[in-house]
Amino acid sequence: MDAISIENCKVSVPANPKINLEQNIVHFQLTNYGLQPDDNLIITYTKKIADFNFNAVVKESELYFNVIDIFSKSDLNIPFENFSFKNPYEPENNWKILRFIFNSILFVLHNFIYVVLLVIAIIFLIMYTNKKRGLQ
């Protein structure tokens, strides 16, 4: 349904999620969730739908609810294993590249003053040595 795969999911749940890779099922259990301030439950996936039509999804909501009802009555007596999902709060890799570029620019700007001072010191040293040689 909707071409969702485990590889493009990001999950943050207050419980320990388990997975069955053969059937693409993520399983976790929440007990008394929402009765007290709990951690957020977030599941995202990265497939971008360019012409997403929310009204069409609402019209088909009965189909989604029927699938949920059928699934909720199914037997989950299948093997699950621990799985480490990507964190939905973690920025994508392209931010890491931009952060590297930004840090490089800051490094150059921060050290620019030292380079300028070094160049000025070398110029004064050359002028001083030339002046001293000229006097002798």
Image (cartoon, grey):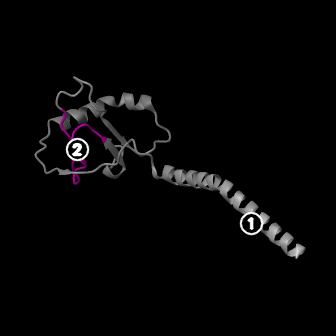
Q: Residues within 10 Å of mark 1 (few under 14, many from 20)?
A: few
Q: Residue at x 33, y 49 (%)?
A: 5
Q: Is residue 4 left or right of residue 128?
A: left
How far across and how far down the image is residue 15, in percent?
Answer: 22, 39
The answer to which of marks 2 and 1 sits earlier in the sequence is: 2
Quick one: 124 or 60, which is closer to the camera? 124
How far across and how far down the image is residue 134, in percent?
Answer: 89, 74
Q: Is residue 1 left or right of residue 94?
A: left
In terms of image quadrants, where is residue 120? bottom right
Above-or-below relation of 124 to 105: below
Q: Which residues are magenta?
A: 12-30
Q: Furthest-top residue in view?
A: 35
* Res 122 label: 1
Q: Residue at x 39, y 32 (%)?
A: 57
Q: Furthest-right residue in view?
A: 135
Circle 2 SS class: loop
For disc 2, the marked residue is 17
User: Is 16 within the magenta?
Assistant: yes
Above-or-below relation of 46 to 115: above
How far across and how far down the image is residue 31, in percent?
Answer: 16, 31
Q: Please tell me whether mark 2 or mark 1 is closer to you in this view.
A: 1
